[in-house]
Image (cartoon, rainbow, N blue to C red):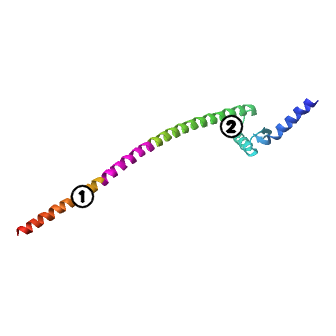
């Protein structure tokens, strides 16, 4: 008997770790036991209820079991479409991430090029200032020479 008590205790512990939720789907009450939060189980139940109610409204001659099968087909269709959409979004995200990385690499190269050009520009400005100073000296010398001729 100790082995039976042990199993019963395990089952009791197992049941306490799960949520028991009462759901109303297509006018019938169901007890659902799951490890998900109670609120989540209610949301799932409401989703199924809405799908099944919509199907039964569209054709009120359907049996509950046929409506349930059609609901399951519709829900799986939603699931497959969601998965396809998720995969498409993942592909778009991957492409966008790759493009972003490419643009970052390009930006680093352009920044390096800009630093080199900025440095060259500074050197050229210094060279220009030096040449302008030399030119001014030459002009001053020429002006002095002309004045001396006068």
* Farthest right residue in view: 1
- The label shown at residue 130 is 1
132 with respect to 23 (left or right): left
Label located before the other in sequence (2 or 1)? 2
Residue 36, compared with residue 143, is above or below; it is above
Which portion, as a residue range, is magenta? Answer: 103-122
Identify the image quadrant of residue 6: top right
Q: Which SS class for mark 1? A: helix
Q: Dividing the image into 4 quarters, which one contains the N terminus? A: top right
Give residue 132's position: percent from left, percent from top: 21, 59
Residue 107, compared with residue 83, is above or below; it is below
User: What residue appears at the point 27 percent right and 53 percent down from the top-left corner?
Assistant: 124
Q: Residues within 10 Å of mark 1 (few under 14, many from 20)?
A: few
* Viewer-closest of 86 and 51: 86
Residue under numbered circle 2? 55
Alpha carbon distance from label 2 to label 1? 88 Å
Give residue 93's position: percent from left, percent from top: 53, 40
- The label shown at residue 34 is none
Marks 2 and 1: which is nearer the front? Answer: 1
Q: Dividing the image into 4 quarters, which one contains the C terminus? A: bottom left
Residue 133, compared with residue 14, is above or below; it is below
User: What residue appears at the point 44 percent right and 41 percent down from the top-left corner?
Assistant: 102
Task: Give the number of marks.
Answer: 2
* Viewer-closest of 84 and 51: 84
Give residue 13's position: percent from left, percent from top: 84, 38
Give residue 15's position: percent from left, percent from top: 83, 38
Q: Residues within 10 Å of mark 2 (few under 14, many from 20)?
A: some
């Amino acid at each position: 008997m100790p082995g039976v008590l042990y199993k019963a205790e395990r089952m009791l512990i197992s049941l306490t770790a799960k949520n028991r939720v009462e759901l109303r789907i297509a006018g019938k009450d169901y007890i659902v036991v799951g490890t998900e939060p109670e609120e989540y189980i209610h949301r799932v139940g409401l989703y199924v209820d809405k799908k099944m109610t919509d199907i039964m409204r569209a054709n009120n001659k359907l049996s509950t079991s046929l409506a349930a099968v059609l609901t399951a087909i519709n829900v799986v269709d939603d699931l497959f479409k969601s998965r396809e959409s998720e995969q498409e979004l993942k592909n778009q995200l991957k492409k966008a991430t790759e493009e972003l990385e490419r643009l970052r690499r390009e930006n680093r190269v352009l920044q390096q090029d800009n630093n080199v050009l900025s440095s060259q520009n500074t050197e050229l400005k210094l060279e220009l200032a030096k040449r302008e100073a030399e030119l001014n000296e030459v002009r001053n010398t020429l002006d002095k020479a002309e004045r001396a001729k006068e």
